[in-house]
Structure formats: structure tokens, C-alpha cells
Image: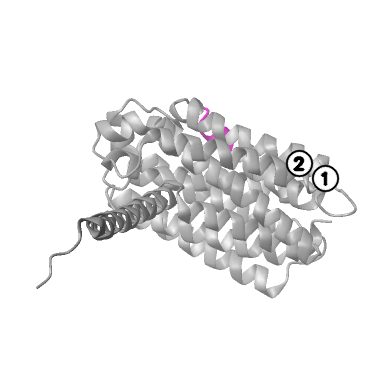
Amino acid sequence: MRDIPASCHGVLGGAGTFGRGWHGDEGAGVAVGRTARALAMACHPGPAVAVTLFAAALAAGVGGSPWTTAGVAAAVLAGQLSVGWSNDWIDAGRDVAVGRTDKPVATGAVPAATVGGAAAVAALACAGLSFALGWRAGLTHVAAVAVAWAYNARLKGSVWSWLPYAVSFSLLACVVTLALPGRSVPPGWAVAAAGLLGVGAHLANVLPDLEDDAATGVRGLPHRLGRTRTSLLAPVVLLVATASVVAGPPGPPAAGAWAGGALAAVLALAAVVVALRRTRSRVPFTAAIAVAAVDVVLLVAASGSLV
């Protein structure tokens, strides 16, 4: 066999270099994919999607155009992403201390600085998208998101932990109507129902994490009340929200509203009974979330009365 000319060695060597470069690019792509998945988990996707769908359904229900509804959804999603990421960024130290395996920052799947940067970018996007709905809706939504950030940064560990939820959910209802051409504020019953829905959601949402939070010094209202009283209070608050939605709109309640109210009452009663008998059960949490879902459906169904 003829010897390969020395002049060709570099070409053949280049193939090896190319191969290493290709595998390096592949590895970088895998790393980017892992980071993206970790960020998706760190944004609290369940609440982010749920609140976004709620806002979009309200916007469509009050007669918003497809463009307005899409704009509301985009602004709310950006805001929820910023809130979720800021939560994991701010709580990184506490989550590591208690060994939270469900938090990507705590497991090392993504650096806290990356999550914090994502939160900042999402917050800027939220501001731009919010003001695209009009300055009234923009200011209102930015205020709602700022209050949620205040919860993550400070109020989570105080007796006022419920207040950001009440304010943010109430303001969210206002954002939807202020984004419409008439720029009106929703009636008091809708604002009250949204605020109560937020408080009830806060009480229910904290139940699974009470012990982990207490271990790191978080002392919000649910932690001060304890598991049993929080399990009792969450469905009661949500049931009051149900009553506001059923009785609030003008005219007699529709059959669907009565049915939803009855279902919420049964779920709330089940949560209370189980909370009194089995303090460690997850039934009160599940029932409270179910009541919140009923409230959302009822509020969306009554959205035509918001303007």
C-alpha cells in the first residue's frame, strides 16, 4: 500500500477535529435542553398555566376580542413565570437546607443565578406586554405582579402572607376588564370573590409544605394557625368566594350557579370533616383545590356580568 502523503495528514486529522466539534455541539445542545427543562420545572408550571388560563377565560367571557384575550394571556403568563422563577431563586437556600427534591435549584439541575436571570427577563417582558393592553391595565397588572414578588421576598414569612394573594387575585380581575375598550372596573362582588379565591388558594397551597417551611423559619399565617385550623379555614374561605359568585351577579342565580354552589358546599364540608378527624390527611388540600376549581368555573361563567 502506498504511504499517505504527509500533506494529507492535516486533512485527515481535520476529520477528527470535526468529529470532536460535532460531539461538542451535541453535548452543548443536551446541556441547553436540560437547563430548559429545569427552568420549566422551576417556574411552578401548574399555577402559572392555571392562572393564565383563568385570566384568558375571563377576558374571553367579558367579550374581549381574540387579540385582547391573547394579549391578556401573554402578559399574565409572563408575570406568572417571573413570580415562579423569583420564588425558587429567593428560596434557593431554604430549599437546599431541607433537601427539596422537587426544586431544580435545590437539586443542582440549574444554578440559582440562571433562575434569577430568567425571573428578571420575564418581569421585563411582563411589563411590556401589560402596558400593551393600555396604561390602566398595565399599571394594575404590574402592581399585581409586584405584590406577588413581595410575597416571595418578605411577606411569605409574616402573618400577612395571605394579603398578596388577596390583592393580586383582585387586581387580576381588574386587569381583564381594564384591558377592554370601555376600561371599566369590575363590580365589587367579582373583586371580592377573586380576592377570597386567592386567599383560599394560598391556604390550600401551603398545606403540603408546612413542615418543610417551618424547618427553615417560614412563619406565614398558615404556619401560625397550624395544619388543622388551616385545613378548616381554606375550604370555608373558598366557600365564601363561591357564595359571592352565586349571589353577586344581578338577577336570580342560574341553575348552573346553584349546582356549582352545592358542589362547592359538599366539597368544603368533606374537607372540614376529614380535617377534624385525620389531621395528616391530604383530603382537605385536595378538596380545597377542587372548591377553588369550582369557583373559577363559576366566575368565568358569570364573567358577562363583570362589565
Amino acid at dot 2: Gly
Residue 54, x across and y down, in percent? 62, 58
Residue placed under numbered mark 2 in the picture: 138
Nearest to the observer: residue 156 or residue 302: 156
Q: Is residue 171 left or right of residue 120?
A: right
Question: Which residues are drawn in magenta?
Answer: 160-164
Whether residue 166 is in magenta: the answer is: no
**Mark pair 1, 2: CA separation:** 6 Å
Q: Quadrant of residue 307?
A: bottom right
Nearest to the observer: residue 178 or residue 126: 126
- The reply to whether residue 105 is visible in this rendering is yes
Residue at x 45% of width, y 49% of height: 44
Secondary element at tag 1: loop
- The reply to whether residue 246 is visible in this rendering is no
Residue 134 tag number: 1
Amino acid at dot 1: Gly
Residue at x 37% of width, y 45% of height: 207
Whether residue 161 is in magenta: the answer is: yes
Residue 79, x across and y down, in percent? 60, 44
The answer to whether residue 145 is above or below residue 46 is above
Nearest to the observer: residue 159 or residue 104: 104
Q: Main secondary structure of the magenta part?
A: helix
